[in-house]
Image (tube, grey):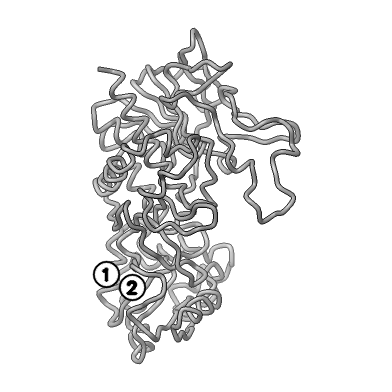
Amino acid sequence: MKFDTIIIGGGLTGLTTGIKLAEHGEKCAIVSSGQSALHFFGGSFDLLGNIKGKEVRNPLESIKSLSPQHPYSRIGIDNISQLANEASQLLTRAGINVSGKAELNHYVLTPMGTLKPTWLTLNEFDCFEENFTFPWEKATIFNFKGFLDFHALFAKDGLKKLGIHVDIINIAMKQLDAIRQNPSEMRSTNIAKVFEKKDTLSELAQKINELSIEVDAVILPSVFGLLNKNVVDDLKAKINKQVVLIPAIPPSVPGIRSQILLRNRFQKLGGTYFLGDQVENGTLLNNHIQDIHTTNHGNIKLVADRFVLASGSFYSKGIIATPHKIYEPIFDLEIDGGNDRSEWVEDNFFNSQPFMSYGVKTDEKFRALKNNTPIENLFVAGSILGGTNPSQEGSGAGICLLSSLYVADKILRSRK
């Protein structure tokens, strides 16, 4: 099978790359092994939230102080603002409506009842301009009896420190009885399916209205709208108080919905999505990848003019660590971390761990390096890039979105 571009990895990076290319007429395929980090999505896309322990208010300004090896620095400061705006528009075209701007972080509530700075947030979640003021003083957290993936007490303690008086009420509904019998079934996604029914949603809203007369806001776990994003709007319209959603423990309902919307957008543009397939290796000849071989396709080669490696970092096995080495498993590309295990970690568990910043080496065009030579048609994007610690910086989603758009732009320019 022949394509213009084949993307290895079907998460946020791969889908963003594929959508931009497909919007410009590229015949694209994505090979996805399964779940992505979007299944852990908290409702916000971070651009840059922290540098060396100091909170960032203006990401665009703070990016200037990052190291030259950081993906943002390599993309180029002048390009970041344009790509950030483009990312927001791409999400909107996919049906993912967000609020936020790259020059000023806003704040969102975490499952711990604390506030964190972020860039773009789904419109169903509340955004706050400051991290110390709220438009309400009294709130009630509503949880579902038997739902253990939402820790209401943690949220209450965090909000109490912010000056909010909070009560907790556990709601029992007969529609949830069947999945409550098995704790492994009482998960966000299964609860969301129950509330796809309008009658059940109306009953929930009625219960909440009866129990929230004297409060300013109602707080709920984000377990609504798995397949239908209008469910959240319907619920908020039925409840008489301000409704505030807080992320629950994964699997993430808004994250899965976002992945579905992105995938649908890609496929409607003519893209081919190979789900549940694994790229095993590729054929390299004269610094060009000729084709790749996947588990499901057996002897059938997937051929393309260009390839994008968006397979993620350690979590998704885009990079693998053994007791003796760290390596990239498909093309055996160069990694910017050494094979001396003692250098991978710091003794203090709470310090920034060196291995978290390891990634595939690339040239200035984000082409992969092998034997210090760029592979001319293999580009790299997303969390597999090195030079950054996204979990510490609060930059993971931003790196995925901006590097994918940057690489897609390089591909589109190269075909002219």
**Residue that appears at 47% across and 43% down:** 66
Return the residue nearer the eye: 215 or 250.
Answer: 215
Q: Residues within 10 Å of mark 2 (few under 14, many from 20)?
A: some
Return the residue nearer the eye: 209 or 190.
Answer: 209
Q: Report the amino acid beneath label 1.
A: Asp
Is residue 99 depicted above or below 4 in this figure?
A: below
Q: Position of residue 104 (x, y in %)?
A: 33, 57
Q: Secondary structure at mark 1?
A: helix
**Residue that appears at 36% across and 51% down:** 258
Q: Report the amino acid beneath label 2.
A: Leu
Q: Residues within 10 Å of mark 1 (few under 14, many from 20)?
A: some
Q: Earlier in the sequence, mark 2 or mark 1?
A: 2
Q: Which residue is mark 1?
A: 234
Q: Quadrant of the C terminus?
A: top left
Q: Which residue is mark 2?
A: 201
**Residue that appears at 49% across and 82% down:** 160
Say if mark 2 contacts mark 1, CB within 8 Å. Answer: yes
Outermost residue, front side: 65
Q: How many marks?
A: 2
Q: Position of residue 233 (x, y in %)?
A: 27, 67
Q: Position of residue 21 (x, y in %)?
A: 30, 30
Q: Quadrant of residue 25?
A: top left
